């Protein structure tokens, strides 16, 4: 029986939200022009061994086949489904829209490009339920690198440098106070985001609401800002097993942000926010110093000119044609 729910429609039936040994989990899928990779993501939802799920779509004004794919999923899925139409503002705004309409005890984001293993939700929930103070659960993930004719150096750099994240922690345990991770002297050594992308984690919904949701002032480090705030709010659990895959391709937003210089500008905004945060005093003194030096000497990003981009593309085409 189809249980499709549009924004503004009646809520989830009470028997689905009853807190049992299998609490309700909201699979939140924010979408925008996602038709190319959305089907594999939805197949992962269908394959989950964890049964007490609802699916929340929030579309940011897609013009491709995204909404058609979502409607087909909603028509055939035995799970309760909400389809929301978000007025395009910011990336964080669309993520927050998903959370605002979620009913689950836990939020499990699944981005349109990514995939999760069949037992992903089951294992993340079991870890979170082990301690009521856990605000965030994460695990390693694999990288899916899309080889395309227009492959970009930025996409390859992300795939090569961000493959293994959790190995950068000094003392990562199964469950620990998030403040201990904030105080880790290696917090911003190497890759800053040692947790991973939103598709990797499980979040206790009430914790996310209590700390104010995702920050719309950020465009690139939205998730890292959230992970730091969740660390300050409670405990963090870690499962040493890859439960998902993060897809890297030239058309994703993180690659575009790197090319336009938006990633560098966002770093400055994020650092300023960290320095003014309630948890800044918990950070290792060397880490605090690194953040302060970044703020004192902001780097103006060099945006590639259209001519340089054109020359690079032309050089590649000539090489493909003549092998030189």
Image: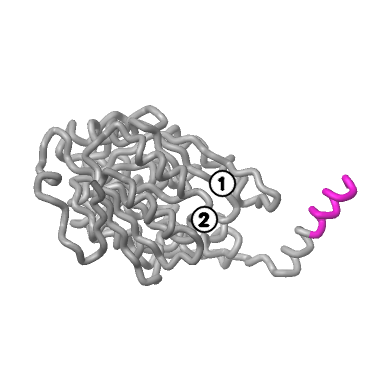
Instruction: Tell me what residue is drawn at x 41 percent, y 46 percent.
Output: 197
In percent of width and height, residue 12 lies at 16, 53
Residue 168, image quadrant: top left
Q: Which residues are magenta?
A: 314-324
Residue 14 is marked as none
163 to the left or right of 56? right
In depth, the one of 115 and 323 nearer the eye is 115
The reply to whether the magenta stretch includes residue 258 is no
In percent of width and height, residue 77 lies at 31, 45
Colour setting: one colour
* Residue 154 shows in the view: yes
Which residue is denoted by mark 2 in the rendering?
Answer: 254
In depth, the one of 4 and 264 nearer the eye is 4
Instruction: Tell me what residue is drawn at x 53 percent, y 55 percent.
Output: 252
Count of number-bearing discs: 2
Instruction: Tell me what residue is drawn at x 50 percent, y 48 percent.
Output: 37
**Badges 1 and 2: C-beta atoms under 8 Å apart?**
yes
Above or below for 289 versus 241: below
Which residue is denoted by mark 1 in the rendering?
Answer: 158
* Residue 187 shows in the view: no
């Amino acid at each position: 029986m189809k249980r499709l729910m549009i924004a503004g429609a009646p809520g989830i039936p009470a028997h689905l939200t009853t807190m049992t040994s299998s609490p309700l989990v909201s699979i939140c899928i924010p979408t925008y022009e996602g038709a190319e990779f959305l089907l594999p993501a939805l197949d992962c939802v269908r394959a989950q061994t964890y049964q007490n799920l609802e699916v929340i779509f929030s579309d940011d004004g897609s013009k491709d086949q995204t909404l058609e794919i979502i409607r087909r999923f909603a028509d055939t899925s035995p799970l309760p489904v909400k389809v929301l139409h978000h007025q395009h503002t910011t990336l964080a705004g669309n993520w927050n829209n998903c959370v605002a309409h979620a009913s689950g005890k836990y939020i499990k984001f699944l981005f349109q490009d990514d995939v999760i293993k069949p037992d992903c939700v089951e294992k993340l929930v079991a870890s979170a339920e082990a301690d009521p103070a856990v605000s965030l659960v994460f695990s390693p993930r694999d990288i899916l690198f899309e080889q395309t004719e227009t492959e970009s150096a930025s996409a390859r750099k992300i795939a090569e440098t961000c493959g293994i994240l959790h190995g950068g922690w000094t003392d990562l345990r199964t469950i620990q106070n998030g403040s201990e991770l904030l105080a880790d002297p290696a917090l911003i050594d190497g890759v800053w985001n040692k947790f991973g992308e939103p598709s990797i984690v499980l979040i206790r919904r009430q914790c996310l609401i209590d700390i104010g949701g995702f920050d719309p002032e950020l465009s690139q480090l939205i998730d890292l800002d959230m992970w730091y705030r969740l660390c300050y709010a409670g405990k963090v659990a870690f499962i040493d097993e890859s439960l998902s895959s993060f897809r890297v391709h030239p058309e994703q937003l993180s690659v575009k942000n790197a090319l336009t210089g938006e990633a560098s500008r966002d770093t400055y905004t994020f650092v300023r926010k960290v320095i003014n945060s309630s948890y800044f005093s918990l950070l290792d003194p060397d880490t605090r110093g690194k953040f302060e030096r970044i703020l004192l000497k902001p780097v103006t990003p060099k945006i590639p000119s259209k001519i340089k981009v054109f020359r690079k593309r032309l050089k590649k085409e000539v090489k493909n044609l003549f092998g030189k």
